[in-house]
Image (tube, rainbow, N blue to C red):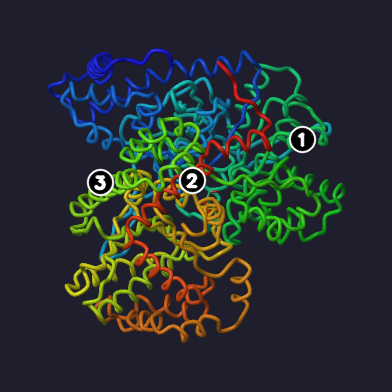
Amino acid sequence: MTQLPSAQQLRDQILYHLTHTQGRGSEFATTFDWRLAVSYTIRDLIVTPWMAAIRASRDQGAKRVYYLSMEFLIGRILGDAIINLGLDAAMDEALDLLGLDKQEVLDNEPDAALGNGGLGRLAACFMESLSSLQCPAFGYGIRYEHGLFRQRFEAGQQVETPEDWLNQPHPWEFVRIDYSYTVGFKGHVEDRDGRAVWLPGESVVARAYDTPVVGWEGHWANTLRLWGAHPTTLFDLHRFNAGDHAAASEPEALARTLSRVLYPDDGTESGKELRLKQEYFLTSAALQDILRRFLAEHDDLSLLPQKVAIQLNDTHPAIAGPELMRLLMDEHGLDFAEARDLARGTLNYTNHTLLPEALERWSTWLLGRVLPRHMQIIQMIDEDHRKTSGRPDHVAILRHDEVQMGELAFIMAGKVNGVSALHTDLVKETVFADLHRLHPDRIVNQTNGVTPRRWLRMSNPALARLLDDSIGTGWTKDLAQLSRLEAHADDAAFLDRLRAAKRANKVVLANGLLAGLGIKADPDAIFDVQVKRIHEYKRQLLNILEAIALWQRIHDDPNADWTPRLKIFGGKAAPGYWLAKTVIHLINDVAATINKDPVTSKFLQIAYPPNYNVSMAEDLIPAADLSEQISTAGKEASGTGNMKFTMNGALTIGTLDGANVEIREHVGAENFFLFGLTADEAARVRARPGHARAAIEKSEDLRAALQMIAEGKFSGGRADPYFSLLDRTWHDDPFLVASDFEDYFATQRKVDAAYRDAPHWDRMAALNIARSGFFSSDRTIRGYMQDVWHIEPVTL
Ligand code: 26V
């Protein structure tokens, strides 16, 4: 952006949009009207760099990356866009001139919750970094009418209600009715003179809805293109005229269900036909759009790998392999080998999980029925791979009457990557060990990252100001510059300001907890935060058991000098994940009991605000002292929340899992609270029969905590809500809660002691920030550009 508008100009534009876009006089305007007027004002300023970026990419014949993802967990857009355009000060003034409260305006925006958790939020951070780095890119996803469900607690239990962010105008998007593609399903394949012709039995239209994503300093914006499903024929006029009004709308109803809701499971294979159709809907629309753009600029399909890189975010869009080959063979007349090589030169696949239940597989029966032509092509790919690589049968794509989407994605990809160093090693050693032996150059690592614009500059203005004052503003686009803070780590004045910034954030959060939950939090207590999806492997259970044990210890000796602590939990469970929901219930039950204990409440409190989402993360993370990253080693692919906490000056208590390993290497072992089994040790313990019972019997604290739950101490004397959970903990405990408990409890006491030495704690916090530069998603995207996509940034 060349010329930034002044506060007066912003005010005038806001008033213009209020009148001419919203059709409201200022004396009648609601916060909603104002928020839309402000959004349109900001959007106008993004359109210019957006057009410039699109033109420059086309004029320079640049290679583009296409990020295909079933999830984009964007959150709110307005605040981030204001920051990236460099308009925060001017906007503050403009809103002042209009007598508006900025926070109220920003908070009026609903979260775009088009994702479940880490995988979707990573895609959103990547979109922002791609623009900040001027890498020509499109994100392709689905425009779900209903994002991730809203969570409430009733009697401590999770209740889900539909989310409806699109039940109001969405000011950021541009609908493109000219970019519409037909996507077919079912039907049959005919052989016409040796050429396969697929005659789908059903079809829908995918229509493009574009949102520009502006990068830091507003130089560049890429497009997030979300597909909405529409009927090919609006309604059946014959049926309507015959009086059958409901049946007349069937085509419309059928189509709309495709982009109606986000599947709320993260990591449980649902095996539902609708999910498969959604995956194909996204993939086919995206590939048709990519080929259309490519052919508008080039006339030789063999150039495809030089001009197009496609990234598959997990296996969800893995049908891209067969779909791209179908388009190249059936519609453009290439032969199998040509199509295969072009597809492999273009597609890449990121693996985000090793959990067996999250590895996608579709029954050959279902896939063959919904996508009959693709089933044929998958058989050809599998057979070709057997012949060319000599692969053994147990790595076939088609086995046990299922299509193994991981194998399909791997075989059709030029590069396959894991998301942290440890995870990539495990990918090579476990899920893809055989394929890795056959294709030893294919797997690479790209450790995740997060955008410092949203997760530091926007969400933590107090800390951002201190950083600007201490080392200048350059960290925002070059996070490695945070290392300059090392020079301040022994400067008492700097550490005082760091503490004051953290404390101010804690006071704001404490006020929110009081207003929302009625919990009166002590801003000088340790704010100990675990926020993420509720999953057994993430071990929220370990955390709440530690709370029970600590509570008992405080009870036994209430006059000792305990370090006050507020434990904060946040996160949703998949609606069908019964055990995860039991853990939510337990946390709420324990919180209710502990919070009203007059003997202990000045030392220990528990808060579990419902409906954790991106916006709540933006409030919680800057206020955290302690970051809980306590998954069973070997199970968390990377984590990205762990990185956000570190750059916001929280210390981590964590296992050697995912990116924790690299965080600890960067910040220094002495500035990280490590506990627990390693991935190798965990695998060995798991193989020992009776490991859980043995560990429980060795730990008096754990035994007492489990006993209290069993006696119904937190559930009005009733034990039945927690029977199965306790049974699993005693007899199975696949995630080794019991085996890691003692070390966790002891390490938490080290945290208590460390927190009491404020200057030392502050120094550790400063060093965590100073050494977190590696965890910017800019670094991650540069890695993909170099090692995977072979794309250069475009200069305007
Ligand atoms: C799987 C499935 C299976 C079918 C139903 C819907 C659904 C939705 C999501 C998933 C994948 C879950 C994988 C995932 O979210 N992995 C997380 O990826 C983060 C970004 O790389 C990483 O930081 C987390 O450690 C990892 O758990």
Whole-percent x and y of residue 195?
Answer: 80, 32
Distance from Cα at disc 3 to Cα at disc 1: 66 Å
- Which of label 2 and label 1 is nearer to you? 2
Q: Which residue is mark 2?
A: 772
Within-10-Å neighbours for mark 1: few <14, some 14–19, many 20+:
some
| Numbered tag placed on residue 185 in the rendering | none
Q: Which residue is mark 3?
A: 504
Quarter occupied by the N terminus: top left
Asked where in the image residue 487 lies, by quadrant, the reply is: top left
Kind of residue sitting beneath label 1: Ala
Label 1 CB less than 8 angstroms from ligand 1: no
Q: Which residue is mark 1?
A: 196
Whole-percent x and y of residue 396?
Answer: 76, 55
Left or right, 292 with respect to 671, comes to right
Kind of residue sitting beneath label 3: Ala
Which callout, 3 or 1, points at the residue further toward the start of the chain? 1
Distance from Cα at disc 2 to Cα at disc 3: 22 Å
Kind of residue sitting beneath label 2: Ser
Residue 465 seen in the current view = yes
Within-10-Å neighbours for mark 3: few <14, some 14–19, many 20+:
some
Asked where in the image residue 86 lies, by quadrant, the reply is: top left
Residue 227 seen in the current view = no
Label 2 CB less than 8 angstroms from ligand 1: no
Which callout, 2 or 1, points at the residue further toward the start of the chain? 1
Mark 2: secondary structure: loop
Between 94 and 237, the residue placed more toward the observer is: 94
Mark 1: secondary structure: strand
